Amino acid sequence: MRNLCIHGHFYQPPRENPWTDRVPEQPSAAPFHDWNERIAAECYRPNADNYSRMSFNFGPTLLHWFEQEQPGLLRTVVEADREARSGFGGHGSAMAQAWGHAILPLCTDRDRRTQVLWGLREFAHRFGRQAEGFWLPETAVDIATLETLSLHGVSFTVLSPHQAEAVRPHDGAWVDVRDGSIDPRKPYWADLPSGRRIALFFYDGALSAEIAFGGLAQDGTALAERLKAAFTGAEGPQLVHVATDGETYGHHHAGGDRALALALTLLARDGEVRPTCYGEYLERHPPKDEVRILERSSWSCDHELGRWTRHCGCASDDGTRQDWRDPLRAAIEGLRDSIAGAWEARVSNQLHDPWAARDDWIVLLFDPSRARYDRFLERHAVTRLAPAERREMAQLFELQQRLIQTETSCAWFFEDLARIETVQVLQYAARAIELGEHLLGLDLSEPFLTTLAQARSNDAEQGNGRDVWRRAISSR
């Protein structure tokens, strides 16, 4: 009756140059070529034997990099999920994730749907099965996001205990838990306005923090003992579960992979604790209680998603200010909105349903072959396209891909506008502007840069957003 699940969120910001689709050299990752390569060596490969014994999600864009640069590592991850199914009652250890790591409550309804569908389609392509669970970037959530997940067949997601507003036992009244006091040892139903429902797991926040920041990731024996101590003496089934960045195990903490492996081994030998994954536990012990979530909340910001919209205090421990987040958000959203109507009008006479076609475009991202493109056009094109029209249509969909990538959350997460994560998003925006001006005849550069110039780096030498943009484009 004592069940244990350790979840790792394995993700890196996308790093490919949008004009070449190759990752450029990143000197800050030395002695490795780039940060993906470095973290693969420090974390992703060393955890090869752990994946099948835990719960995990990998960012879809990171798995694409695996496929291109380290295909053996991709095979390891996929095989781990297959192996887990034999030990966890047919349930795999992998969860899906939103494709571009956008903060889904900040997306338009249309973009949220595409992010979820692309994540689910990519997962099915990689793992050969439909995803049961879905990891929300930064666990950012609102009711509209849960509705989108439920609509597309997702059974559960995982949230922070501080994202629960109230719980109601199946035979009781609502109880306020906004202080983080929700019992994390069981799942809950979130009943949605549509009449659908989705299961929510709230990880053990204190224990997860001890692993990520308190040293437990460096001592496998202590980790195993601490996990066991989290169970109570209460009768009935219990699930002790934690969630951290997967990079905790080896990159953030050297040797963390070995500590995790030892803890998993010790716990597997312990007859009192049974390792599991969320899908298996949900099947065996479906929720009895109901929960209401805190709208527009996440695991990494206590200010209603302020970390991705304004200076909220997050990432300012060093005295810096993040007022640049607001104009960056306004510039990106303004670019998206300026293109949407013109793009739809441009392709409407060639495609049956332009936005349904965009949702389906993901198949070309993991298989860009001519045969796949032919089948795509057979499904979506009104008439047969001439060769020049085919090439232009591919560019029109690349434009949409780059717009989706401009919403990558990492651009707003850290302390300064001039970091490589924000520069990456500015390069996506530059490519989208280039395509939008060429294909749609729009004037996009100056409105975008006028707004972006209102953002200022904390480093006076870096200047404002226009200055950072100019360097980002010149480095392409």
Image (spheres, rainbow, N blue to C red):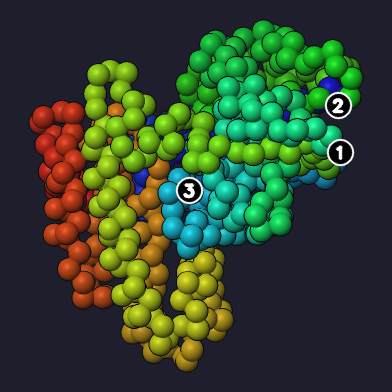
Give the residue drawn at x 26%, y 45%: 328
Q: Quadrant of residue 9?
A: top right
Which part of the image, by quadrant, shows the N terminus? top right
Q: Quadrant of residue 444?
A: bottom left
Circle 1 residue: 284
Circle 1 Cα neighbour tier, 10 Å, few/some/many (<14 / 14–19 / ≥20)? few
What amino acid does circle 3 point to? Pro
The reply to whether dot 3 and dot 2 touch (C-beta < 8 Å) is no
Q: Residue furthest front?
A: 173
Per the model, the C-alpha gap separating discs 3 and 2 is 33 Å
Per the model, the C-alpha gap separating discs 3 and 1 is 31 Å
The reply to whether dot 1 and dot 2 touch (C-beta < 8 Å) is yes
Judged from the image, the secondary structure of the residue bearing numbered disc 3 is helix
Q: Is residue 244 left or right of residue 420?
A: right
Per the model, the C-alpha gap separating discs 1 and 2 is 10 Å
Query: Foreground: 172 or 376?
Result: 172
Where residue 282 appears, x then y in whole percent? Answer: 79, 40
Circle 3 residue: 105
Circle 3 Cα neighbour tier, 10 Å, few/some/many (<14 / 14–19 / ≥20)? some
Give the residue drawn at x 67%, y 8%: 222
Give the residue drawn at x 20%, y 56%: 448
In the displayed structure, 235 sits above or below 373; it is above
Circle 2 residue: 237
Residue 101 disc label: none
What amino acid does circle 2 point to? Pro
Where residue 90 appears, x then y in whole percent? Answer: 82, 45
Judged from the image, the secondary structure of the residue bearing numbered disc 1 is helix
Query: Foreground: 229 or 234?
Result: 234
In the displayed structure, 308 sits above or below 248; it is below
Label located before the other in sequence (3 or 2):
3
Question: In this orientation, does residue 241 appear?
Answer: no
